[in-house]
Image (cartoon, rainbow, N blue to C red):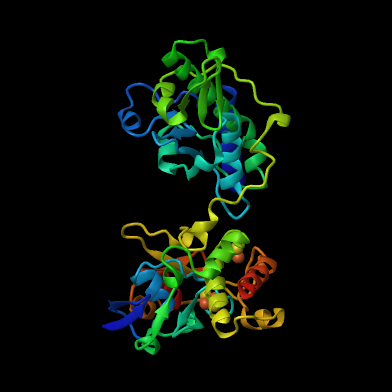
């Protein structure tokens, strides 16, 4: 039995400790907001926060995060009011939306570390892949938060 | 196979559209429909609080169909856009109701191009039914009733009724045989920029993508192909794989690939 703290709630799951956090979220806890893209840490669709830092859940064994505070898109806010979510709505960033939970988690983590990121900071920190090509709006949305 | 499917859907859509289908669909005697908020026609449900539910038969993939298609209905319905609530059709109901919503294939930038005429007609027809219902309630000729922004006005006296108040009576009105569509110079919703209505859900991670669908007793399959083009399957260790956690079956696919069926996608792909 493994105990995890996700979005400020404790969850007990019966799972092989080597299972990636992504699959515990999606399959065991039915939290499907966190997406599967590649499974090999390349695309960022599975980005969550572990103690406030962006991390790729597809390559994070659950056994490594039993003492950590995990935040997923479902916990970024309960009502879509997190500044990143508000900026994403204002700039209509999502197209299909599949990559966006990971994109927003990466952006939120970046803004906590660097409240005024430059384009270069954004490019360096947000390596998430968006098949729809929403990159220009991701940048614009992040800058709009930085200015406020 | 895709082509066959599209062609079939297309043929069905054209048959029904040609037959003047889908309007005035709230048939008397259908209890399930009568119990719910009144369906003025298959595309439009108007609730007592004036919320106008507009059904959407195409997929939203970021191209904006979930916003654009209801705009077409709302334009002819003379609905208040702020009260319009798009809703996806239920595929099971679509089949049960003899494909009342026509073609659903979402391909080739066709959603707007192929459905605008029947969607606008559905909106215009519902508008005429609302006008007829208000005229009947006021006992005045329909020509004295105007529909605008979800409100019906009896022009000579200035009396008003909101759409929600007459929707139930409107749903029992006969659907007009033929309706005129507005010239584009009179459009107030179409041709104006509107925010995409599904975005607030998307920023909360709520939409259910195909990979998020969970059905009772669902199993997952992962397929391993030959790494080389045209490569053939020589052998695989079925026993070793079958012992792995969650694995239910190992199946050879012709002579070129192996599928592992398991309780979860992760378990299937790991094996
Ligand atoms: S699924 Fe984790 S990085 Fe692609
Ligand atoms: S919005 Fe479609 S993949 Fe990014």
Residue at 44 percent across and 69 percent down: it is A77
Give the residue drawn at x 66%, y 35%: B188
Left or right placement of residue B212 versus residue B80 in this view: left
User: Can residue B248 be seen in the rendering of this structure?
Assistant: no
Residue occupying the point 41% across, 42% down: B92
Residue at the (42%, 27%) spot, across then down: B167
Q: Position of residue A88 (x, y in %)?
A: 58, 64
Q: Position of residue B124 (x, y in %)?
A: 57, 26
Compared to residue B214, the image places residue B143 above or below, namely: above
Q: Residue furthest right?
A: B185
Q: Is residue A62 above or below residue A7?
A: below
- Along the viewing direction, whichever of A3 and B249 lies nearer the viewer: A3
Q: x%, y% of residue B91?
A: 44, 43
Q: Quadrant of ligand 2?
A: bottom right
In the foreground, A15 or A49: A49
Q: Nearer the viewer, residue A76 or A11?
A: A76
- Quarter of the image for residue A29 reads bottom left
Q: Quadrant of the C terminus of chain B?
A: bottom left
**A79 to B86, vertically: above or below:** below
């Amino acid at each position: 039995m493994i105990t995890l703290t996700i979005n400020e709630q404790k969850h007990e799951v019966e799972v092989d400790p080597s299972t990636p956090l992504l699959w515990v979220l999606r399959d065991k806890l039915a939290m499907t907001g966190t997406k599967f893209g590649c499974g090999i840490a390349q695309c960022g669709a599975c980005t969550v926060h572990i103690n406030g830092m962006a991390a790729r859940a597809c390559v994070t064994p659950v056994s490594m995060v039993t003492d950590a505070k995990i935040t997923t898109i479902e916990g970024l806010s309960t009502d879509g009011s997190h500044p990143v979510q508000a900026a994403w709505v204002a700039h209509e960033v999502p197209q299909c939306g599949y990559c966006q939970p990971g994109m927003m988690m990466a952006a939120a983590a970046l803004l906590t570390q660097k409240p005024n990121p430059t384009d270069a900071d954004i490019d360096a920190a947000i390596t998430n892949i968006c098949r729809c090509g929403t990159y220009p709006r991701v940048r614009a949305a992040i800058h709009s938060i930085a200015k406020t | 196979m895709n082509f066959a499917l599209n062609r079939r859907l297309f043929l069905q859509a054209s048959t029904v559209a040609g037959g003047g289908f889908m309007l005035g669909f709230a048939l008397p005697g259908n209890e399930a429909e009568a119990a719910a908020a009144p369906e003025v026609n298959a595309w439009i449900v108007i609730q007592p609080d004036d919320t106008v539910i507009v059904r959407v038969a195409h997929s939203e993939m970021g191209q904006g169909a979930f916003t654009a298609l209801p705009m077409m209905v709302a334009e002819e319905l003379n609905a208040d856009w702020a009260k319009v609530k798009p809703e996806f059709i239920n595929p099971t109901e679509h089949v049960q109701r003899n494909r009342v919503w026509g073609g659903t294939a979402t391909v080739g930038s066709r959603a707007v191009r192929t459905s605008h005429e029947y969607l606008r007609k559905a909106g215009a027809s519902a508008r005429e039914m609302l006008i007829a219902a208000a005229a009947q309630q006021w006992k005045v000729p329909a020509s004295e009733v105007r529909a605008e922004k979800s409100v019906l006005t009896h022009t000579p006296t200035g009396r008003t009724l909101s759409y929600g108040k007459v929707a139930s009576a409107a749903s029992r009105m006969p659907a007009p045989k033929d309706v005129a569509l507005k010239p584009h110079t009179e459009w107030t919703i179409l041709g104006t920029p509107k925010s995409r209505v599904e975005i607030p859900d998307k920023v909360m991670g709520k939409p259910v993508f195909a990979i998020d669908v969970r059905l009772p007793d669902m199993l997952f399959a992962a397929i391993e192909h030959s790494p080389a083009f045209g490569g053939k399957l020589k052998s695989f260790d079925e026993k070793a794989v079958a012992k792995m956690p969650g694995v239910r079956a190992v199946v050879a696919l012709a002579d070129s690939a192996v599928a592992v069926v398991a309780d979860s996608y992760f378990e299937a792909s790991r094996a």
